[in-house]
Image (tube, rainbow, N blue to C red):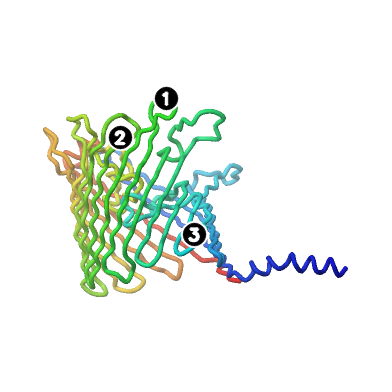
């Protein structure tokens, strides 16, 4: 009996040592419903076309765990859809993993993160969470990183397949748009420093043809700079693309640049002036010149009616986007935003003027209570003859879009032991 007691005590020693590490678990939920009225959203409607309306919903449940020795993990499940699309008695409802990753920290600032994860960098122009979309965007990847003081360095690696193949490695684009991805991101700065600088290099491999291993690569490299002295918020980005176009043999030479100047007049008013340029394809050469903004949150930049890039992948004429906006915050609970965009094609094309149209975006955000926010918006597009030629529809018909969203984001449990 005495020997057994000693043996059990020795086995308990490692458990007691592990128990000394602080553990933390958080459980978060989100219910977000959004009603939309579409009467010219994404493309000009025809004269006799009838508007669309619907309600979509996202339901998420996230469980996060952290341990004092550097181990952390997160699982976030979601169900998304449109009200009425699923039967009342549903035996085949689909639950998706928005996030499912584990992370290990070791040494001074080093970590490795493996699994399904959100890649959101800088202002989300190239890699973004796409939170506006009811499903969001996630990548299956390994992230190796170093973060300490003013420096952050991330290496993201991904390799995708359609299934557990018995033979061959041919990847037919399905869940993810690429077969290979290697991305290196470096950031200098922190919240206390007015200057921030990021550098990005992404190498994306697309498989083409019918042969095995017929993969072509496109490279995107560039920088994002922020400078926030007192009442100003200045941001600039520039990216260049080279390599091969979407797995084809065509060479790529494309670029984009943006600048955003924000001025904080006082506690209630903020103004911003922005300009974006994305190179386009004129179809006259043997090189692809249309810039591809990849996996960014395009809804955030090029007008909320999503005429460009967000939902029109076939549009390749490039873009000039001149934007003027204002934000009014009369209280801690209320924000009012107004933005005006003037769009032009990024190329000059015979027989067509460059002007595409003017979009006006209005939005109201109201914090009803902690973890509960009401948002609503209204937008209209005043298209030109050129836009009508490109997108179809009737520019003389009134084009507008309205939406209202309720988001409930409670933290259900936060526990440490």
The spot of residue 359 in percent (x, y) is: 22, 51
Q: Residue at x 40, y 54 (%)?
A: 154
Label 3 SS: strand
Residue 193 position by quadrant: bottom left
Q: Are marks 1 and 3 in contact (CB under 8 Å)?
A: no
Query: Is 210 left or right of 306, judged from the image as shown?
Result: right
Q: Report how far apart the C-alphas of labels 3 and 2 lie in the structure.
A: 38 Å
Under tag 2, what secondary structure? loop
Asked whether residue 131 is in view, the answer is: no
Sequence order check: which comes first, mark 1 or mark 3? 3
Residue 118, image x, y percentages? 44, 52
Camera-nearest label, 1 or 3:
1
Q: Are marks 3 and 2 in contact (CB under 8 Å)?
A: no
Q: Quadrant of the C terminus?
A: bottom right
Mark 1 → mark 3, Cα distance in angstroms? 43 Å
Marked residue nearer the N-terminal end (3 or 2): 3
Disc 1 residue crowd, few under 14, some 14–19, many 20+, Cα 10 Å:
few
Residue for badge 2: 245
Residue 375 position within the rendered picture, expressed as x and y whole percent measured from the top left: 37, 61
Which residue is the extreme one toward the right? 1
- In which quadrant of the rendered image does the N terminus lie? bottom right
**What residue sits right under mark 3 in the picture?**
30
Is 214 situated left or right of 307 in this image? Answer: right
């Amino acid at each position: 009996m005495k020997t057994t007691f000693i043996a059990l005590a020795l086995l308990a020693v490692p458990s007691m040592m592990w128990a000394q590490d602080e553990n933390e678990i958080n459980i978060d939920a989100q219910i977000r419903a959004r009603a939309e009225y579409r009467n010219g959203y994404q493309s000009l409607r025809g004269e006799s076309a009838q508007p669309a309306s619907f309600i979509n919903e996202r339901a998420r449940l996230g469980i996060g765990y952290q341990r004092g020795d550097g181990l952390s993990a997160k699982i976030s499940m979601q169900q998304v859809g449109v009200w009425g699309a699923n039967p009342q008695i549903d035996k085949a409802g689909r639950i998706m993993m928005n996030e499912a990753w584990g992370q290990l920290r070791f040494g001074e600032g080093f970590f490795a993160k493996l699994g399904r994860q959100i890649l959101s960098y800088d202002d989300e122009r190239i890699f973004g969470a796409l939170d506006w979309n009811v499903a969001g965007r996630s990548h299956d990847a390994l992230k190796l990183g170093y973060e300490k003081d003013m420096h952050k360095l991330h290496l993201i690696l991904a390799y995708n397949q359609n299934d557990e193949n018995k033979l061959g490695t041919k990847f037919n684009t399905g869940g993810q748009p690429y077969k290979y991805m290697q991305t290196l991101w470096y950031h200098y700065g922190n919240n206390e420093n007015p200057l921030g600088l990021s550098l990005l290099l992404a190498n994306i491999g697309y498989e083409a043809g019918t042969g095995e291993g017929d993969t072509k690569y496109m490279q995107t490299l560039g920088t994002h700079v922020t400078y926030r002295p007192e009442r100003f918020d200045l941001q600039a980005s520039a990216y260049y693309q080279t390599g091969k176009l979407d797995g084809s043999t065509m060479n790529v030479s494309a670029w984009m640049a943006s600048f955003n100047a924000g001025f904080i007049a006082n506690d209630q008013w903020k103004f911003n002036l922005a300009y974006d340029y994305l190179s386009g394809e004129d179809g006259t050469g043997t090189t692809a010149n249309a810039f591809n903004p990849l996996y960014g949150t395009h809804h955030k930049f090029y007008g909320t009616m999503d005429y460009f890039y967000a939902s029109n992948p076939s549009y390749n004429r490039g873009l000039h986007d001149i934007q003027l906006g204002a934000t009014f915050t009369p209280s801690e609970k209320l924000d009012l935003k107004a933005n005006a965009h003037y769009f032009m094609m990024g190329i000059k094309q015979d027989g067509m003027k460059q002007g595409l149209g003017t979009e006006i975006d209005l939005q109201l955000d109201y914090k009803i209570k902690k973890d509960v926010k009401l948002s609503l918006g209204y937008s209209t597009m005043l298209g030109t003859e050129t836009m009508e030629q490109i997108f179809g529809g009737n520019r003389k018909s009134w084009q507008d879009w309205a939406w209202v969203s309720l988001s409930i984001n409670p933290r259900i449990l936060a526990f440490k032991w």
